[in-house]
Amino acid sequence: MFRNQLARASIRSTSSINQIRNMITAQAVVYAQHGEPKDVLKTHKYEIDDDNLDSNSIIVKTLGSPVNPSDINQIQGVYPSKPEKTTELGSSEPIAVCGNEGLFEIVKVGKNVSNFKEGDWCVPSAVNMGTWRTHMLCGSEEMTKIPNPEQSKANGKPNGLSINQGATISVNPLTAYLMLTHYVKLTPGKDWFIQNGGNSAVGKYATQISNLLGINSISVVRDRENLQELIKDLTEECGATKVITEEQNASKEFGSEIKSWLKETGGEIKLALNCVGGKNSTGIARKLSNNGLMLTYGGMSMQPVILPTSLHIFKNITSSGFWVTQLLKNDMELKRKTLNQIIEWYENGQLKDAPSKETKFNSNDDLSKYYIDGIVNSKGGKQLIVY
Amino acid sequence: MFRNQLARASIRSTSSINQIRNMITAQAVVYAQHGEPKDVLKTHKYEIDDDNLDSNSIIVKTLGSPVNPSDINQIQGVYPSKPEKTTELGSSEPIAVCGNEGLFEIVKVGKNVSNFKEGDWCVPSAVNMGTWRTHMLCGSEEMTKIPNPEQSKANGKPNGLSINQGATISVNPLTAYLMLTHYVKLTPGKDWFIQNGGNSAVGKYATQISNLLGINSISVVRDRENLQELIKDLTEECGATKVITEEQNASKEFGSEIKSWLKETGGEIKLALNCVGGKNSTGIARKLSNNGLMLTYGGMSMQPVILPTSLHIFKNITSSGFWVTQLLKNDMELKRKTLNQIIEWYENGQLKDAPSKETKFNSNDDLSKYYIDGIVNSKGGKQLIVY
């Protein structure tokens, strides 16, 4: 269990001290009680004493942290993974800092810290670190290094990571990569996976990554006015093998079309990725070959997963869940390996990040307002606060 | 692939020969086309020449073979596992012999056969052998020996197997035992499994077997007028730990009652067995502990398996299918081991078989009539034709 609040250095609430030295003034978006974000979020200001840094601790400043749906659910109290509330930031009542994903830059390192130096970039090693804040004091093992743009260039890579790539690397790209690689062996050039939510952020990462791995993909999307444009985009920009509509996926007749695609490659649909649920999950499960696996990582339709009995008994289809938080909780090696692969693709320009709507924080402002607005605006796309 | 029709000995259709020697006259219930049993089943008569038995072959006579739902579905053509049609029994058109389960007695063995002698009992090693017939000529490896009553007694066992026990040993008891033991490690005295269809044949075997293994059970049954009588029967006769109704299983309030049971044993509900589907499958899946497994082996409600997304993602519940035919197809060792355990419990009087309605075949009659009647009467309980 990582507990950044335990890092041994002076943290004092700004309200409780007379500022006599040049400390770092930090802001964090916190809640003391669960509830609707606009009702419970507030800004907590505190000082980090960078002159008395513990030998194994580091101080980081935030470069960017996004608003993820799970962050909102965590504030509402309906998410199974929750940060502990604490008074260690000098608050009068126990509080938790919001946010799970983010990109940080090292400001100062304790004298025994060997894995970081000033200017390095890093992401949280685990969830529940509280990334919606301007600065953080934490143990050096609580952060995982990723290359900053100068380091990438020095290393001969064509590109450095953008703030958005670094700040959103920990959830969606890892989810897509791990679902495609950690459970089922898909033979490049032959085998297929099928997914619904093909136009979602994870869906697009999965399409791009499968293309990089040589795996064929079938993405199911909702029918829409600009369908042909979307198909063109997913095919040309993400490397989708096939894009079909929910209606085609539900149609028995269309099944023979899909079978002809499989015949061409000599492979099977061994994996289905479900983030929709309901009859849409049934539709992709039906396309699986014998002994296939469906991984559910979301439920956008708010409908449960529905699986015909015969798929279980006679086709030996298995239905499981995927939660990146749980999978990587106790497997830092897998996280490091997966991060490295995503970073390499970003550096080589082979993988495109899902764009975020970026809002620049002005340090004279109150930080919580940015995230409260970000939550409201989330419906229109991913929001990223940059610092 | 076992193909009893390939056993090398003369088989001739009775219509095509002049009977000049004392051959065995056999009857088999066959179909040439799929369809409703009453329309497509007929009796095929043929002779087995027991004077010219191949050195590795055996001739068996049938002691009993039941009508299983899967046998009916196989005739209708809606079951995924099907026998091949052949003319090797001397028919003018390709036919398949019905039936998958049965008990047989060795009548004669080829001179190289060492695993059987006359009078031994046996069951088919695999499915699709065609057990609805009076006699069978097959390779010795196509049958698996089980002790006849004299052998059990000579071995110091208190009981020999009954015809019903032997003729129905291959599907339901193996299904119950393998679902309880092959997938999840349940700690005796602590852990639990939950099942719907608690009053079904497999359900009662599962209850008895879990009791013999020291595993706690929760059986969900439909509410009924004589509920208390059923609960008493399942508890006293089968050793059920707890029996609850579907309404209790669906009720949130009842969940705390179940939690108190778990607390008493210090165990978890790690396994759910589903033969109903629909909301009934959701109900038992919700009772599973984190990382639990639900195995679906039937769908009596004709509704699909329904799993809330959160059970998959946040509780890591897995939903899979169980089909004894497929599991044991290529694992004779597991089949032998499982059979031995069931036989031992029968011999010791520790396990009770599900009763069948037995009808004695009169060899002057036409055999297909018995099974056509048996199919009709199946709705009132399992039918067994004894010879």
Image (cartoon, coloured by chain):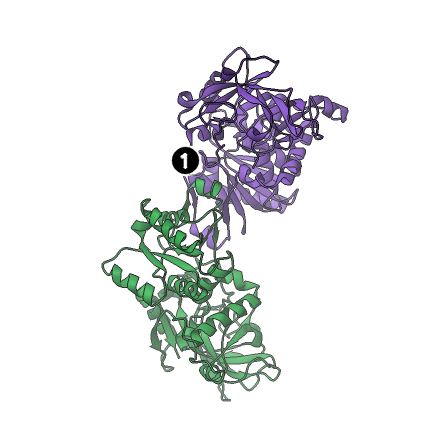
Chain colours: A purple, B green
Q: What residue type is labelled 1?
A: Met
Which quadrant holds residue B366? bottom left
User: Front-most of A340 and B373?
Assistant: A340
| Residue drawn at the location 41% of the way across and 48% of the way down | B285
Does the image show residue A165? no
- Picture coordinates of residue A74 (x, y %)? 46, 30
Relative to A322, say whether B33 is above or below.
below
Q: On the rendered image, what quadrant is the C terminus of chain B found in? A: bottom left
Residue at the farthest top position: A364
Residue B202 vs A347, above or below: the answer is: below
**Is residue B144 among the parts visible in the rendering?**
yes
Instruction: Indicate whether A338 appears above or below B287.
Output: above
Chain at tag 1:
A
Residue A260 or residue B130, whichever sits in front = B130
Q: In this view, does B216 lie to the left or right of B327?
A: left
Q: Is residue A205 above or below residue A290?
A: above
On screen, residue A234 versus residue B291, left or right, reads right
Which residue is at 53% across, 47% downward?
A293
Instruction: Give the quadrant of the N terminus of chain B.
Output: bottom right
Q: Name the residue under label 1.
A: A302
Q: Where is residue B135 in the image (x, y as percent from the top left)?
A: 47, 79
Residue that protrudes farthest toward the bottom in the picture = B21
Is A47 or B204 nearer to us in this picture? A47
Side of A139 relative to B320 (left or right): right
Total of numbered circles in the picture?
A: 1
Q: Where is residue B95 in the image (x, y as percent from the top left)?
A: 48, 68
* Image point (39%, 56%), residue name: B195
Q: Is residue A176 left or right of residue B271?
A: right
